[in-house]
C-alpha cells in the first residue's frame, strides 16, 4: 500500500457530493437537542458494548464522544468538508441499530474506528465515518 492510500487528507474539501447524499440525515441529527444527543450517544455505547467485548476496539469512538461532551468540537468538526463527526456517529448508530445484517456492518464500523488510530484529526474522523455510512445507505 502506498502512502497516498493512507493519507486521508487527499479528501479534504473533496467530499461535498458525497455529503449531499446524506444531507437529510445530517439535518435530522443536527436538530436533535443536546441532552437527547448525549442520551443517544450513551445508548450507542451500551448497544455496542453488547456486541463488542474488547472495549479497546471502541477507544476512538470514546474519544469522539468525550470531545463532544467536553464541548471540544474543534476536534470533531472538519471545515474542509463541513462535517461534524458526532453527527456521523449518530447516523451510524441509526444504521447499525436498524440493520438486520448487523455482524457485517459492525465489522466495517469497527474497522473504520481502528483506521482512525493512524490519525484522529477531524477530517480523518469524519471521512472514515462517512465511508461507513455511504457503504450502507
Image (cartoon, grey):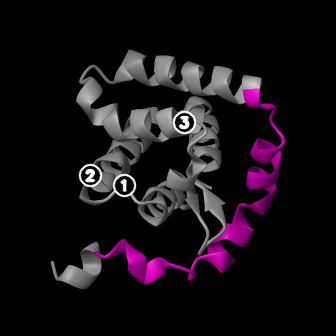
Do residues under tags 1 and 3 come within 8 Å of each other at their CB atoms?
no
Residue identifier under label 2:
117
CB atoms of marks 3 and 2 within 8 Å: no
Q: Position of residue 62 (x, y in %)?
A: 41, 32
Is label 2 in contact with label 1 (beta carbons under 8 Å)?
A: yes
Give the left or right position of residue 37, taking residue 99 as reference.
right
**Label disc, if present, on residue 38 of the rendered structure:** none
- In front here: 49 or 13? 13
Q: Is residue 80 magenta?
A: no
75 versus 80 height, above or below: above
Residue 96, labelled with which disc?
3
53 above or below 1? above
Q: Is 26 covered by the magenta stretch?
A: yes
Residue 120 shows which numbered tag? 1
Residue stretch in magenta: 7-34
- Disc 1 crowd rating (10 Å Cα; few below 14, some 14-19, many 20+) is some
3D distance between C-alphas at marks 3 and 2: 22 Å
Amino acid at each position: 500500500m502506498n502512502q497516498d492510500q493512507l493519507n486521508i487528507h487527499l479528501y479534504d474539501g473533496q467530499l461535498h457530493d458525497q455529503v449531499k447524499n446524506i444531507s437529510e440525515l445530517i439535518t435530522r441529527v443536527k436538530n436533535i437537542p443536546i441532552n437527547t444527543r448525549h442520551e443517544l450517544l450513551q445508548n450507542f455505547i451500551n448497544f455496542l458494548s453488547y456486541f463488542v467485548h474488547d472495549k479497546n476496539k471502541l477507544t476512538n469512538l470514546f474519544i469522539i464522544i468525550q470531545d463532544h461532551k467536553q464541548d471540544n468540537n474543534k476536534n470533531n468538526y472538519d471545515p474542509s468538508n463541513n462535517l461534524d463527526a458526532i453527527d456521523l456517529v449518530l447516523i451510524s448508530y441509526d444504521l447499525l441499530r436498524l440493520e438486520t445484517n448487523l455482524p457485517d456492518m459492525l465489522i466495517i464500523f469497527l474497522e473504520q474506528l481502528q483506521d482512525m488510530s493512524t490519525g484522529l484529526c477531524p477530517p480523518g474522523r469524519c471521512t472514515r465515518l462517512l465511508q461507513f455510512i455511504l457503504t450502507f445507505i
